[in-house]
Amino acid sequence: MVRTRKLRARTGSVAVEMALVSVIFFLLLFGILEYCRFLFILHVASNTARDTARYAVVKTSGGNMPGDFASISQAQIEGAAQTGQIDGTNVSSGMGGYQKNLTNYRVEVFAVDAVGLFAPIPVCQPLAGSSWNSAGFSQKIAVRVSGTYVPALPSFLMMGPGFPVSITAMASSEGN
């Protein structure tokens, strides 16, 4: 003969356990999503810097094809980094509107001081008294995209107020 024991009712204990576990689960889930969002912004900024640097080194002294710009200004290159276009012509991928995720968003285009590149700890710094569009053949030109990434829910995830982002792409000039 088998005895069956009557279980006592556990009303409410499942709800309490679910409440405790779900808090940890959602913190982990939102943390993963925020980290993925941060990596995505880094990726977009990296692509923007690289594409803009590529365009800048090819068009250092303006275009050489019919319909190309005679000269390209600093403001046009900065606009290309933001929107991907110069006067309605697609020239790079641009930030695609994601620059709104970076406060103090800034784009710099400059000729690189070669002395800094050969230092014990290499530094990509602007060449004093020189403009990027006057760079000679094979001289380095850099594009730096920078800003501060602000998390969507910083207080909820107990994160800091923001993380600095600075992406620099450098290439050799093909102009002049």
Image: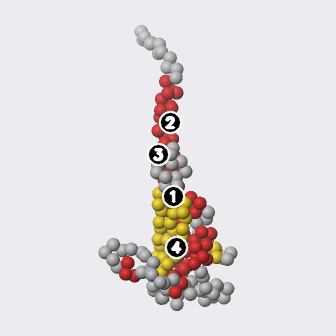
CA–CA distance in space, label 3 to label 4: 32 Å
Q: Nearer the viewer, residue 64 or 151?
A: 151
Q: Secondary structure at mark 4?
A: strand
Q: Amino acid at mark 1?
A: Tyr
How packed mark 2 is, by other alpha carbons closer than 10 Å (few <14, some 14-19, many 20 or more), is few
- Residue corresponding to mark 4: 108
User: Element under label 1?
Assistant: strand
Q: Earlier in the sequence, mark 2 or mark 4?
A: 2
Q: Are marks 2 and 4 in contact (CB under 8 Å)?
A: no
User: Is 39 placed above or below 116 here?
Assistant: above
At label 1, counting other C-alpha atoms closer than 10 Å, the crowd grade (few under 14, some 14-19, many 20 or more) is many
Give the x, y percent position of residue 61: 56, 87
Q: Is residue 126 above or below residue 48?
A: below
User: Can you identify the residue that label 3 sits on?
Assistant: 158
Query: Which residue in the structure is indicated by mark 1?
Result: 149
Residue linked to disc 2: 22
